[in-house]
Image (cartoon, rainbow, N blue to C red):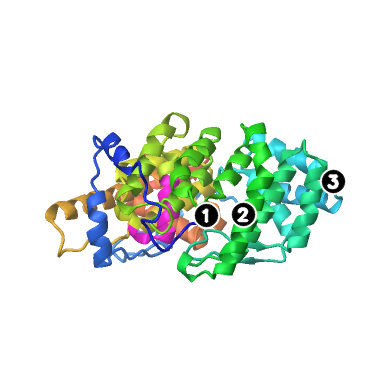
């Protein structure tokens, strides 16, 4: 079992080798992380800030200076809603082979929503909803809600899957259900806070899940779904500290643009699981370099955007330039989807607000942090100026007004003139008086 309370219990035996491999790459922030964490800096605030010294397009005095395209998204008409409805219909009709065929098609084609989120996970969530009695909220050691599914219902579904062994997605669902059962026993607390009986029960459920999945690991070597579920066994695997890199590589090689793989890898690289603080960023940058030909640096950015929600001080660990490259790659992977760009802008804005202490750190550390902050601000402005093509009010925390406020942050130089602006499918255009 994973001990999430003792960081060095699964110390990584190849960490030193990776240090040598990456030794030629600049690490401007690795040395900063530990002292700044100890000092307790890094207050992060959500929402667009309003500075009385700045000009804003949401202000009535300037609101007529911009014409913009606004898109309202009906959640009932998204690809995720379509897949969810299909699953519910198939489950209601007990059309298990139809369900398996639909999921296999989603898995093999790497079907995705505009955000890049894989629709196979939407389908898996939808069928879980059909069987779950409720959900346990995420906790310090559980990054996602865990479904409470009655063991007898899981037994029933395993019997269904056994009737159709040629349909690997049915076995995958059964494996997933049993793993949810394991999380129900384990919970989201630190390992030292788990009762021994719960450890044993969780271990049995996880072993059952792995046994159900095992025949298909070799039979379906090109399935990202199978690779994801195999990776998901890690929290219950005593040898996970050694296998995490291999399982991640298998998963990400099958679907390099799948950001969920990069997020989960980063999550389990944290010291509270299988990682060590001094190697955390090195592993993520090594993965980014290996994925660069397929997905650019998007995975690196996804990892930090996810981890900083859990550990705000991780911003001090990251390579600012690589993160900035990755954020832009994420926008490009979505084909500059305005909802994706909006969420990226706001996430980067949160990160840029870390404090730069003036005492107890060296001038070089202060300079490095100032450079990081400037890089994050520039990245935010690049997203706004070069990748935003419409305003989706639901995607902005504060609706259209917030979107205009963020745009204003990137347009202060132009707002101080008489320039006007157009935001449409071609992107943002700045128009002078003569235009």
List x then y, in percent, for residue 325: 37, 39
Q: Residue at x 37, y 43 (%)?
A: 283
Q: Nearer the viewer, residue 428 or 222?
A: 222
Residue receiving disc 1: 235
Q: Which residue is mark 2?
A: 206
N-term mark: 2 or 1: 2
Q: Which mark is residue 343?
A: none
Give the Cα distance between marks 2 and 3: 27 Å
Q: Which residues are magenta?
A: 301-313
Residue 413 appears anywhere in the view: yes
Q: Quadrant of residue 284?
A: top left
Q: Residue at x 21, y 50 (%)?
A: 368
Q: Nearer the viewer, mark 1 or mark 3?
A: 1
Is the C-beta separation of discs 1 and 3 under 8 Å? no
Q: Nearer the viewer, residue 370 or 62?
A: 370
Q: Are marks 2 and 3 in contact (CB under 8 Å)?
A: no
Measure how far apart labels 1 and 3 are at the Cα level: 33 Å
Main secondary structure along the magenta-highlighted residues: helix
Q: Position of residue 363 (x, y in %)?
A: 12, 55
Q: Is residue 334 left or right of residue 61?
A: right
User: Which secondary structure lies at badge 1?
Assistant: helix
Question: Mark 2, residues whose alpha carbon is within 10 Å: few (<14), some, or many (≥20)?
Answer: many
Residue 142 appears at what percent x and percent y? Answer: 52, 61
Q: Earlier in the sequence, mark 1 or mark 3?
A: 3
* View extreme (top): residue: 293
Q: Position of residue 428 (x, y in %)?
A: 44, 42
Disc 2 vs disc 1: Cβ atoms closer than 8 Å?
yes
């Amino acid at each position: 079992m994973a001990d999430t309370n003792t960081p060095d219990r699964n110390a990584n035996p190849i960490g030193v080798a990776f240090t040598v491999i990456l030794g030629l790459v600049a690490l401007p922030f690795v040395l900063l992380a530990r002292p700044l964490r100890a000092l307790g800096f890094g207050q992060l605030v959500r929402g667009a800030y309003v500075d009385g010294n700045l000009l804003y397009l949401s202000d009535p005095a300037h609101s007529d200076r911009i014409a913009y395209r606004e898109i309202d998204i009906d959640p009932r008409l998204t690809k995720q809603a379509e897949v969810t409805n299909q699953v519910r219909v198939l489950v209601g009709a007990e059309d298990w082979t139809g369900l398996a065929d639909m999921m296999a098609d989603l898995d093999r084609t790497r079907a995705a929503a505009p955000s890049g989120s894989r629709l196979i996970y939407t389908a898996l969530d939808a069928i879980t909803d059909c069987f779950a009695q409720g959900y346990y909220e995420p906790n310090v050691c559980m990054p996602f809600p865990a479904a409470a599914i009655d063991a007898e219902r899981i037994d029933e579904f395993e019997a269904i899957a056994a009737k159709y062994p040629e349909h690997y997605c049915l076995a995958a669902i059964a494996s997933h259900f049993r793993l949810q059962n394991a999380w129900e026993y384990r919970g989201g607390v630190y390992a030292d806070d788990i009762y021994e009986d719960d450890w044993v029960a969780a271990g049995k459920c996880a072993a059952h899940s792995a046994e159900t999945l095992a025949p298909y690991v070799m039979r379906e070597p090109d399935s990202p779904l199978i690779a994801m579920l195999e990776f998901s066994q890690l929290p219950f695997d005593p040898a996970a500290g050694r296998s995490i890199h291999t399982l991640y590589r298998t998963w990400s090689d099958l679907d390099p643009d799948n950001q969920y793989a990069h997020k989960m890898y980063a999550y389990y690289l944290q010291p509270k699981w299988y990682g060590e603080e001094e190697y955390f960023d090195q592993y993520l940058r090594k993965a980014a370099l290996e994925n660069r030909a397929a997905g650019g640096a998007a995975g690196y950015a996804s990892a930090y955007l996810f981890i900083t929600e859990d550990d705000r001080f991780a911003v001090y660990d990251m390579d600012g330039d690589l993160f900035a490259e990755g954020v832009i790659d994420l926008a490009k992977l979505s084909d500059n989807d305005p909802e994706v760009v909006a969420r990226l802008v706001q996430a980067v804005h949160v990160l840029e607000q870390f404090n730069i202490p003036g005492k107890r750190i060296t001038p070089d550390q202060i300079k490095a942090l100032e450079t990081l902050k400037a890089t994050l601000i520039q990245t935010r402005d690049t997203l706004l100026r070069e990748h935003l093509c419409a305003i989706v009010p639901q995607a902005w925390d504060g609706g259209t007004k917030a979107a205009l406020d963020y745009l204003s942050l990137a347009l202060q130089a132009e707002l101080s003139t008489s320039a006007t602006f157009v935001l449409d499918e071609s992107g943002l255009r700045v128009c002078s008086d003569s235009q």
